[in-house]
Image: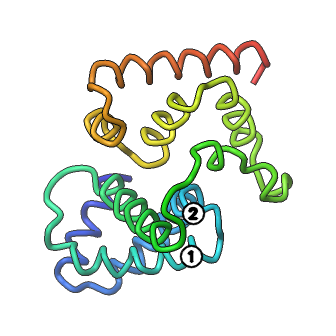
Amino acid sequence: MIQTINRLIARIAKGDEAALNELARLISSRMLSVARAATRDRALAEDVVQESFVKIVDNAHRFKRGNGYAWVCKIVHNTALNALRKIKPTADIDEFFDIADTFDLAERSAASLAVERAMSVLDKQEKLLIFQKYFMDYTVRDSAKSTGIDKSTVSRKIIKAEEKMREFLTKSGQ
């Protein structure tokens, strides 16, 4: 899928509208998930996705080799953070993992609920690092920079958090 996305971004850089439509068909739902995870507001998330497509078109010529999917997710994430900064200056990381109260449980998959439950065994900093890694596609370096923790400590904390989640899921039969 990453190669397909990379090819689509290259076509978008050349002005191919069909490529933009194909990219939207391929990953717009994931883009909306990233935006919703960051904003916790469906309407704002939809606006973020729309603005992200504009940014993708405007910046496709800057994309070089690499992971186009991660590049798109990073654009969505940054656009969502910018939108949130306009609304509220800070947010508590625990708010991002209290999703079950906000959405109808029938809409959520069993896997999503299992992950959310597994996140409950983590402390605030572990939640933030896992959120950054899996939902925001942060590298260890990105997380270290955003938290002010050195890279080796971030890496160890992520491994520890993943082990805690894995143990929780194994014990709960998920």
Residue 13 lies, in percent from the top left, at: 19, 77
Q: Quadrant of residue 74?
A: bottom left
Residue 2 or 101: which is nearer the viewer? Answer: 101
Q: Could you say whether the residue bearing mark 1 is in a helix, strand or loop? A: helix
Tell which residue pokes out farthest to the front in this image.
89
Residue 174 lies, in percent from the top left, at: 75, 24
* Disc number lying in front (1 or 2): 2
Q: Amino acid at mark 1?
A: Glu
Q: Sequence-wise, which precedes: disc 1 or disc 2?
A: 2
Vertical side of 122 occupied by 45: above or below = below
Write down the residue under mark 1.
Answer: 46
Q: Residue 39: which disc?
A: 2
Residue drawn at 26 percent across, 69 percent down: 9
Residue drawn at 34 percent across, 82 percent down: 54
Residue drawn at 32 percent across, 86 percent down: 17
Residue 128 or 172: which is nearer the viewer? Answer: 128
Vertical side of 76 occupied by 108: above or below = above
Residue 65 or 135: which is nearer the viewer? Answer: 135
Residue 46 lies, in percent from the top left, at: 56, 76
Whether residue 31 sits left or right of residue 169 in the image: it is left
